[in-house]
Image: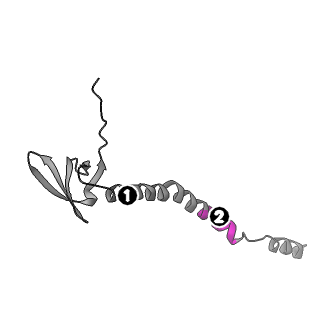
Amino acid sequence: MENLILLNAGAEQAPSIFSLLLPFIIMAVVFYFLLIRPQQKRQKAVNQMQADLKKGDKIVTIGGLHGVIHALDEATIQIDVGGGRKLTYDRSAIKNVVEVEETTAE
């Protein structure tokens, strides 16, 4: 009888490596689709916007400064803020380009 109990105790199988790693794999996939991938898309859009800047664009800096691009360089941008004042910023300081809606006189 004692031998039978020992045989049954040894019959239990240890969980497979795949079943142990499955929760971690699922968490990695969820993190990728919820956190990493959207951030990469946003960064790609910002990089494209900063590469497409041109003279005359109305922009806003990350500090909230509004102005018009006066001159461009590979790394810097000169912004006309009005009153003949021009400030120099890095391209990476540009938050977005302001879309000006054109209104027609009726």
Task: Name the side, left or right, on which 55 lies relative to 1.
Answer: left
Please identify, in this view, whether the residue under mark 1 or under mark 2 is nearer the observer: 1
Question: Image quadrant of residue 54?
Answer: bottom left
- First-in-chain label (1 vs 2): 2
Q: Which residue is mark 1?
A: 48
Furthest residue to the bottom?
A: 3
Q: Residue at x 79, y 70 (%)?
A: 12
Check residue 22 in the rendering and tell me which mark sits there, or answer none. Answer: 2
Q: Label 1 vs label 2: CA separation? A: 37 Å
Structural crowding at the residue carrying mark 2, measured as other residues with C-alpha within 10 Å and reported as few (<14), some (14–19) or many (≥20): few
In the image, 64 versus 33, the foreground residue is: 64
Task: Name the side, left or right, on which 65 lies relative to 4.
Answer: left
Q: Magenta segment range?
A: 17-25
Q: Residue at x 33, y 56 (%)?
A: 52
Q: Residue at x 19, y 47 (%)?
A: 67
Quarter of the figure that contains the N terminus:
bottom right
Task: Name the side, left or right, on which 7 lies relative to 66.
Answer: right
Question: Image quadrant of residue 91?
Answer: bottom left
Q: Looking at the picture, how far across and down is residue 34, in whole percent?
A: 51, 54
**Image height of 97 relative to 90, above or below:** above
